[in-house]
Image (spheres, rainbow, N blue to C red):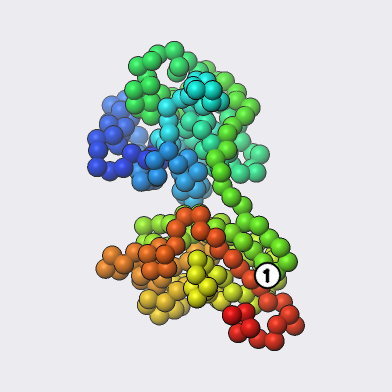
Amino acid sequence: MKIITLTSDMGLSDHYVAALKASILRVDSSIQIVDVTHLIRPFDSAQAAYVLKSCFHEFPEGTVHLVAVDTEPIVNFNGLDGSFPCILKKDGQYIVANNNGFFGAFLGTDQDYELFRIDDVLSNPKLFNFPSKNMYVPAAIRILSGENIDDFASKEEQFKTSLLLEPTTEENVIVGIIAYIDTYGNAITNIHESLFEKVGKNNPFVLYMRRKEYYIDVISSSYNEVNTGERVAIFNERRYIEIAINRGANNGLGGAEKLLGLKVNDKIRIEFQPQGSRTSLEELF
C-alpha cells in the first residue's frame, strides 16, 4: 500500500488542500492519502512537528509524510540562513518538509535518522508558486515509486530547530508548559510520565496552572474518573500530562482551554511533597 499523509497550515475553507491531493492522484490514483491536520497555526513548524510526531509511529514502514507548513525555500533572503526542501528518513518512513526548524523540533535529541536535501528545485522560479504542490509532492511520489533517494537528493548534515521548550526541574519541582491544545480544549503539557516519576518518587503533589485556585493533586486513569465538569489530569497516549475538563467541550464550552483560561506556552508547575517535608497536603495552599 502506498500512503502519503498531509500536515499543513492551509485550513479547510480554500482550494489548496484539494489541489494538493489532486496533484497526487493525477500521477497515481492508487495512493492512499491520509489527512493528519490542515489546521496548524500559519508557519508554526514546531506545532506541525508535535502533531505529526504524535501519530508518526502508527503508520507502516514506507509511509511518506508531506509537511506543507512554511514550505517556500529561503535562499539567503534578507540575510537569513537558507531553508530548503529536504527528506528525513526515520524508522523506515519518510518526511518531506522544508528545513525551517521542523526537523529539529521533530527529532529532538534523536540521532537515528538520515537527512537529504532535494536537488534542483531552486532553478525553476515557477515552482515557488505553491511549492508544496510543485516541489514536495513530486519528491514524495518518487519515494513511493521506489526511486533511490540518492538519485534526486543529496545528504544534508544540518537542520534548523524550531523552539520546543523542555521542562526544567529543581528539588521536588517540575516547571513545564502547555505544548498543545486539541480540538476538545484539552491542554497537553511537555511533562512526560518518566520525568514526573523521576522527580516525584511517588510523593504527593500539586499541579498548578495559570491561577493558584486551579490545581490538581491526582493523576487519573481516565477522564471519567471525575464528575462531568470537573478538572482532571491524565497521562495521555504518549504519556504526557494532559489537563482537561471532563466533557467540558460539550455545548461549545471549549474544555480546559476556555473554562480554565489555558493557552499554549502557559507555565505548568508541579510541586511534590516528600514525606516529612510538610505535615499535611493542605499546607501547600
Left or right: 273 as drawn, with respect to 127: right
Residue labelled with disc 1:
200
| Of 99 and 20, the residue lying toward us | 99
- Quadrant of the image for the C terminus? bottom right
Q: Give the x, y percent position of residue 165.
A: 59, 50
Left or right: 281 as drawn, with respect to 219: right
Q: How many labels does the image show?
A: 1
Q: Give the x, y percent position of residue 68.
A: 40, 35
Q: On screen, 8 above or below 168?
A: above
Q: Is residue 3 visible?
A: no
State the SS at label 1: helix
| Of 212 and 131, the residue lying toward us | 212
Q: Which residue lies furthest to the right in this view?
A: 276
Quarter occupied by residue 26: top left
Quarter occupied by residue 66: top left
Q: Which residue is pictured at 51% across the width and 58% down the height?
A: 266
Kind of residue at disc 1: Gly
Q: Give the x, y percent position of residue 85.
A: 48, 26
Q: Dot 1, crowdedness within 10 Å: few (<14), some or many (≥20)?
A: many
| Of 35 and 200, the residue lying toward us | 200
| Of 52 and 200, the residue lying toward us | 200
Q: Give the x, y percent position of residue 180.
A: 47, 54
Q: Which residue is pictured at 43% across the width and 34% down the height?
A: 70
Q: Which residue lies furthest to the top in this view?
A: 123
